[in-house]
Amino acid sequence: MTEKEMLKISIEEFSRIQRYMIAAGKDSNVYQLIKERYLDLKVILTSSGINLTDIDRIKE
């Protein structure tokens, strides 16, 4: 898998995870579990040079 493919998959997963978090609501246990993956992806994308300003809907 190329770096470009990996970034594409990570961005798609980041978007999907945010939709799940919004649907679950901040006070749910599910939200807290999903948040771990959200933070992992945020670190991966940021360290890869992706600007999250426009795609981060959660902003935590």
Image: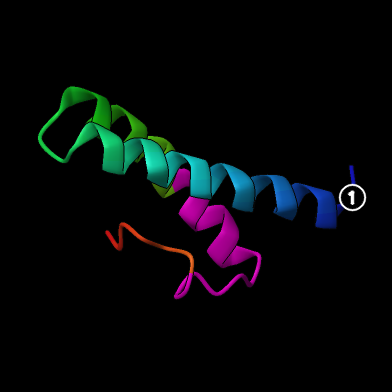
Q: Which residues are magenta?
A: 40-54
Q: Residue at x 40, y 48 (%)?
A: 39
Q: Is residue 12 left or right of residue 8?
A: left
Tell me which corner region of the image, top left, top right, bottom left or bottom right, holds residue 20: top left
Q: Residue at x 70, y 45 (%)?
A: 9
Q: Residue at x 16, y 41 (%)?
A: 26
Q: Position of residue 7 (x, y in %)?
A: 72, 54
Q: Is residue 41 left or right of residue 28?
A: right
Q: Position of residue 38 (x, y in %)?
A: 41, 44
Vertical comparison of 33 with 13: above or below: above
User: Residue 14 versus residue 49: which sits nearer the camera?
Assistant: 14
**Amino acid type assigned to the residue bearing label 1 in the image:** Thr
Q: Which residue is mark 1?
A: 2
Vertical comparison of 42 with 25: above or below: below
Q: Position of residue 37 (x, y in %)?
A: 43, 37
Q: How many marks?
A: 1
Quarter of the picture containing the N terminus is top right
Quarter of the picture containing the C terminus is bottom left
User: Residue 19 versus residue 49: which sits nearer the camera?
Assistant: 19
* Residue 45 drawn in magenta: yes
Q: Residue at x 28, y 43 (%)?
A: 22
* Residue 44 drawn in magenta: yes
Vertical comparison of 3 with 23: above or below: below
Tell me which corner region of the image, top left, top right, bottom left or bottom right, holds residue 53: bottom left
| Residues packed near mark 1 inside 10 Å, few (<14), some (14 to 19) or many (20 plus) | few
**Residue pushed farthest top?**
29
Q: Is residue 59 left or right of residue 56?
A: left
Q: Secondary structure at mark 1?
A: loop
Vertical comparison of 54 with 27: above or below: below
User: Residue 14 versus residue 36: which sits nearer the camera?
Assistant: 14
